[in-house]
Image: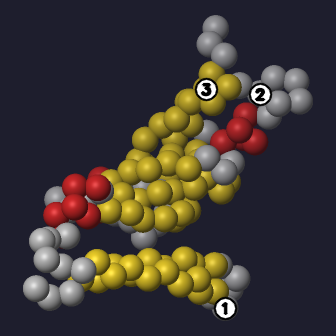
Amino acid sequence: MTKKDWYDMKAPSYFNTRQIGKTLVSRTQGTKIASDGLKGRVFETSLADLNNNETSYAKIRLICEDVQGKNLLLNFHGMTFTSDKLKSLVKKWQTLIEATVDGKTTDGYVLRLFCIGFTKK
């Protein structure tokens, strides 16, 4: 008898692929509930895997917000570029300009936006 259960990870509906994988969690035991161990967990996957295309330099972070049966409902948590993509953007004799701003939407979400720019040679 195993002490862990498999749960299916479901991506948000705006991605082409909904089923993105499975994850393990310890079974409910006493006062320790399995769903509490899953909520807030962050998963990272490639944008290419979510949209069935070849663009593989964007990494998407999804956070578990709800557990329904054996399904984890995930929501967008962030996006980053792979380190090799960022390094390929920077060229010799250019200046790198970075900016960060926090914005709040009308429905209460706080977004932190990062902008990256380069000067001409």
Separation of residues labelled 3 and 1 (CA atoms): 38 Å
Query: Residue 107, position in %: x, y?
Result: 68, 85
| 111 vs 1: above or below | below
Secondary element at image label 1: loop
User: Is there any visible trace of residue 68 in the rendered image?
Assistant: no
| Residue denoted by label 2 | 28
| 88 vs 115: above or below | above
Closer to the camera: disc 3 or disc 1?
1
What residue appears at the point 57 percent right and 78 percent down from the top-left corner? 111
Q: Is residue 86 left or right of residue 4?
A: left
Classify mark 1: residues with Cα within 10 Å, few (<14), some (14-19) or many (20+): few
Residue 5: mark in rendering: 3
Report the residue that reaches farthest toward the front: 93
Query: Residue 61, position in %: x, y?
Result: 47, 57
Q: Nearer the viewer, residue 98 or 78?
A: 98
Report the residue that reaches farthest toward the right: 31
Secondary element at image label 2: loop
